[in-house]
Amino acid sequence: MREVKRNTIKRKHRKWPWVLLILIILITSGSGIFWMKYGYDIKSAIADGYSYSEGLTKSDFRPKNSTVIYDRNGKVLKKLSQSSSDYVPISNINPKIKKGLVKVEDQRFYIHHGVDVYAILRSLGARVIHRRIEGGSTLTQQLVKNVVLKDQSQTVDRKLKEMVIAQQLEKKFTKKQILEFYINDVYMGHGSYGFSSAADYYFSENQNKLSIDKLAMLVGIPNNPAYYDPVNYPQRSLKRRNMVLYIFYNNKLISHNAYLNARKRPLGLKINEHKFDNDVSNNYALSYAVNNAAEELMKSSGFMMKYKFNSDKEMSQYYANYQQEFDRARGELVEGGYSIHTTIDMDVQNKIEKIVSDTYKSYTGRDVHGKLAPQVSSTVVDNQTGDVLAIVGGRTTEGDQVNRAINGYRQPGSAAKPITAYAPAFERGYLPQSTVIDSAIAGRKNWYNGYKGKTTVRDALANSINTVAYKLALDDNKHLYYNNLSKMDFARISPEDDNPIIAIGGFKNGVTTTEMASAYSSFSRGGKFISPSNLSSIYDNENERYIYQNTHPKTSVYTKDASYMTLNTMQSVITDGSGKNAKLDNYDYTAGKTGTTDDSKDSYFVGMTPKFTIANWTGNDMPSTLTAAEEGLSMQAFKAEGEYLVDTLKEKNKNFKKPSTIIVDGDKLSVQNKNKEPSIQDIIDNDFSKYNSEQKSKNAERLANLDYRIIYHLTKKEEYSRERKVEKAIEKYKDSPIIKESQYNKKLDDLQKIRYLNANVKRQNAKSDFNNQILDLQKSLNMSQAMFQTSKDNKKIAEYNQEKEKIESERESKRKSKVNNLMPQYNTQLQKVKDAYANNDSDKENQKQKLIDIMNEIRSYGGNVPDVKINVNSSN
């Protein structure tokens, strides 16, 4: 029995080495696979971090110049004065802020070198073992994330750069300086940057005079300025303050009695609104521009805009995060340092505002809040560019700062029908003359009594028949009535709106006139949507780079045929339907749609010409029934605005552009399929080999120019910014040629830095071009070094020249020798490639690559071989 046990124990012991070996193999293999997949990105991120940190100076952490907003002609519209960022030297900062902040946010601040490995491991342990989230970032890392990178994205790439820069900062600056930067630059909520500004805002006091309870409240804010906001969430702020006080007590910064007394005190807020002239609420176009600019800053910092949600909870969480990031970005704009160029033409803006004001001037009543009633919002979109030409958010900005054109979410009524019901129906094969049935449907009714029975699609839209629009949406199996809205940036679309009821305007949260105008505008571009904006660019003056440039990217939403049929059918709304009062006297081809909600609480009209689209809303801020005259104001305003714009924009009296596939016969439209461009499937079916060859060629060229977007998901702005850095570095290198040998090491370092910058360039063509330039510079530098070395050894110029000629001759001879040795290989491989393509061999691509490698090697030695063009016969 004992013998059996011994054998069993021996067998168990023998297994352990094998288990250990397998574990080692698995770990090694896993590490290798991980490095193969992510190694390049990791090296790039690290190199990027070094590049970022290289040029950082103290000025990068100082208050910036004012942000300036310009109109379309470069005229200054507004200067956003320095934000509430009062820079205070470390010697004048309250000592308790310095000590308390370190104890709460980074207790090992004076020990680590920018990155605290212990804190990272502790954070991971807390997350895995206790399922509790603890911060692992040091104060230096937080400074890098918020001030240097301005990137809130949770990516490995950003984290690596942050860690590298943090360590480099610790080498450049003292701990005292880094703490000074943090205390002055950290965002404290409500547009306040730094503790001095926050003390003034929340308590109307100097930071040096704060009591310990107030100081503790401020120290608690940076952890999450939105969540611990003392103004909006006082209870959360109070709990956070008391926790900070406990940390102070535990670390012997305050006595036990001081701790107990401080806990009992209220927050003691005494808000001191910043007295900077940063108010843009009295100008609808400016407030819209600042809103757009804040969102673009959010995007540049890694925030992803979202317009479609799986649940209301997900939507709610997103908008809570959105608001926090929006406030941060807007505060950053106000802090200064940006040039914002807009498309605003104040002459057009002021005229549109006056037209709207004159239309509503006889209505002088006010609601319970003292606001004029009824209210209005109006948005004008340029159909060619998608730019917002003018925007009106209400009847006055005096005592009324709401910009309803971007924040007034109200029901559009039947104005939703073209984008939700009719355009998708035309895509499914319906025509304006197609027959539909106006009949009873459960829970839905028309604005008139009874039903018309058999009617046409054109008549149903012209007369705004609800039952038909609802049935068309009900028949939409792809739910385009809902999915298309997220493509067109409708911001408050709820998961509950995935319901055909929105085809007749029954949205949960409503829409804005800006959203409606830009959606309708898509029809004029053959179904291509352009996000509405009145920005041209945002330039970061401190970092000398563009944050945003409006390239007017288009998103396909509707087909050209469906778009034209929708426009053509909407023209019947103006000529024969509910929109007759919107007909323009100076233009004959207006298209549009009316919209009225239940009990006439909202009145909508969206109308358009080939050049512009206008969306108008009329209603009371507290929804209540409008009179018949008030209902007509939206169309009345459109008519006046439209006639002004036709004259101002010098629009010719021409109809919307008709696709060649559409045949018009009076009110009847049809689609001529034979003139239609062949689909990709048609091309594949008819001539696959030709299609395949063309696609390979196109894809190769596309990848060389767009790999930064396709593979690395960078925007054009981000990629071109990286390329510009390399260009500038090369220009700077060339501006100071090497003239003495002592400069060699410095120039060598400069070249290496350029290589680091080029590692971040992702566009293949650009990277290759830069590599060639760097190689030439390296050759030149090596030659210079050789010259210096040679001049040392050769006192006489004649001897030097002789030696130089000899060296050059030898090099040329070697290159020729290399080329001569490679040419037979080239000729042999060229024949192999020809044979492989002629026979359509499976390894023809490999053979071609071998030929390219030989050609590249020949050329690298100065040889000259022609590019090989392989013509593949379509019959092969």
Image (tube, rainbow, N blue to C red):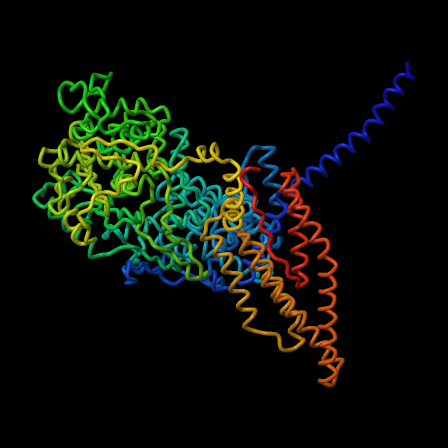
Which residue is at the front of the view, 24 or 654?
654
- In percent of width and height, residue 299 lies at 42, 47
**Which residue lies at the image location 23% right of the left edge and 50% below the top edge?**
390
Name the side, left or right, on which 747 lies relative to 811: left
**Which residue lies at the image location 32% right of the left edge and 38% below the top edge?**
560
The image quadrant where one finds the N terminus is top right
240 in relation to 774, above or below: above
**Which residue lies at the image location 75% right of the left edge and 59% below the top edge?**
821
**Number of numbered discs visible in the structure rendering:** 0
574 in relation to 298, above or below: above
Give the quarter of the image for residue 210. bottom left
Residue 730 visible? The answer is yes
Name the side, left or right, on which 283 lies relative to 694: left
Can you name the residue that lies furthest to the left here?
A: 362
- In percent of width and height, residue 184 lies at 45, 57
Can you name the residue that lies furthest to the right here?
A: 3
Name the side, left or right, on which 535 lies relative to 160: left
671 in relation to 513, above or below: above
- In percent of width and height, residue 585 lies at 11, 45
Give the quarter of the image for residue 676. top left
Residue 104 visible? The answer is no
Give the quarter of the image for residue 584. top left
Can you name the residue that lies furthest to the top here?
A: 1
Name the side, left or right, on which 460 lies relative to 733: left
The image quadrant where one finds the C terminus is top right
Which residue is at the front of the view, 836 or 160?
836
- In percent of width and height, residue 525 lies at 30, 43
